[in-house]
Image (cartoon, grey):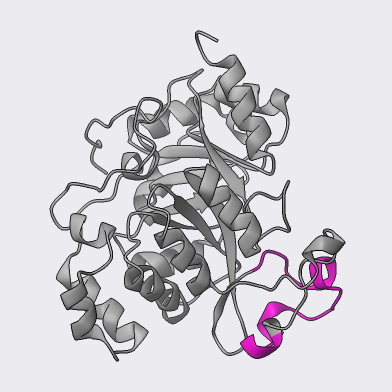
Amino acid sequence: MRRAPDAVDPATAPARVPSIRRPGLRRLTVPPRPVVRAALAGMGVAAVASLLWTVSTPTDVYAIDVFGALRQPGEAAAIIGHRGDRSMAPENTMPALELAMDDLRYVETDVRLTRDGVPVLFHDTDLERVAGRHERIEDLDHAEVARLDVGSWYADQWSGERVPTLDAFLDALAEREGARALVELKAAWTPDEVRRVVDLVEVHGLRGRVVLQSFSIETLQSVQRVAPTMPRIMLIRELPPDPVPIAEQLGVIGFGTTAASVTAAQGAVDLAHAAGIAVLCYTLNTQETWEQVSALGVDGIITDQPSDLDAWIASTAPGT
């Protein structure tokens, strides 16, 4: 893994995420031109994505392309809304996700496949907690999933909220040029299953703005096989003392891990940064943990309380 080139510090960067300027990656940071869209009309998602992938394939993917300059100890980490803004609306629903995308540079969500292969946004292994049913998403066709009420459990005012498709989420993301998404692929995915997600990312012109992540090595290997240049993160509960070898093996740009993990292996963050690899922490909701990981120089904090974290960063930033 080569050392990444210098990047602009995100603390001083403009709110809008700039297009990546490397040859081969630039064209797919914006939707296809009207003439291209006209030429592609009527083609299937997979065919369109295949053509877009052929038109322009980047040679390198770096953490700085997604997160800006990697942080030094004490520098403010990126704020990442966990399943949207769960403090304001039901998790992984379009209202929660749109609230996060409107206010933050990064939002995190989860994807599972319905029985008939439609990628939808849903976290839990079953529907019990948010829909009061014992089935899994994988047990139902999309037509059945689309009728589920996943808002009433949160509050009566959200009654009738539905499980969004990944396609709908990416459409909303594409409308917000300053936003990027961390998309966790839940459980183990085959290369053919991963291709359905990659195809949607390509059709929406979002390469470089969507990062795929997973706890599953099998899934990360599937992404590596299908889309080796798509940025991806390994989720891991315990960060190795030297995380660089496994990052190079899987081609990941970063790790998502726990506060306890980075505290136990403090040198791992420095080793990762020296190799151009980002380190994020999940899911942190207290000032104590925010302060703890920020002191170690983590690059992003995934939280259920993005507004509170933003206020804390503002109040503790140098000069305030």
Left or right position of 32 against 278: left
Q: Which residues are magenta?
A: 122-144
Q: Quadrant of the C terminus?
A: top right
The spot of residue 250 in percent (x, y) is 39, 56
Left or right position of 120 against 179: right
Q: Is residue 236 visible?
A: no
Q: Is residue 186 visible?
A: yes
The spot of residue 206 in percent (x, y) is 35, 61
Q: Quadrant of the N terminus?
A: top left
Residue 236 or residue 143, whichever sits in front: 143
The spot of residue 110 in percent (x, y) is 59, 62
Verify whether residue 22 appears in magenta. Answer: no
The spot of residue 105 in percent (x, y) is 47, 43
Q: Residue at x 61, y 72 (%)?
A: 164
277 above or below 274? Answer: below
Q: Residue at x 33, y 70 (%)?
A: 202
Left or right position of 150 against 192: right
26 above or below 308? Answer: below
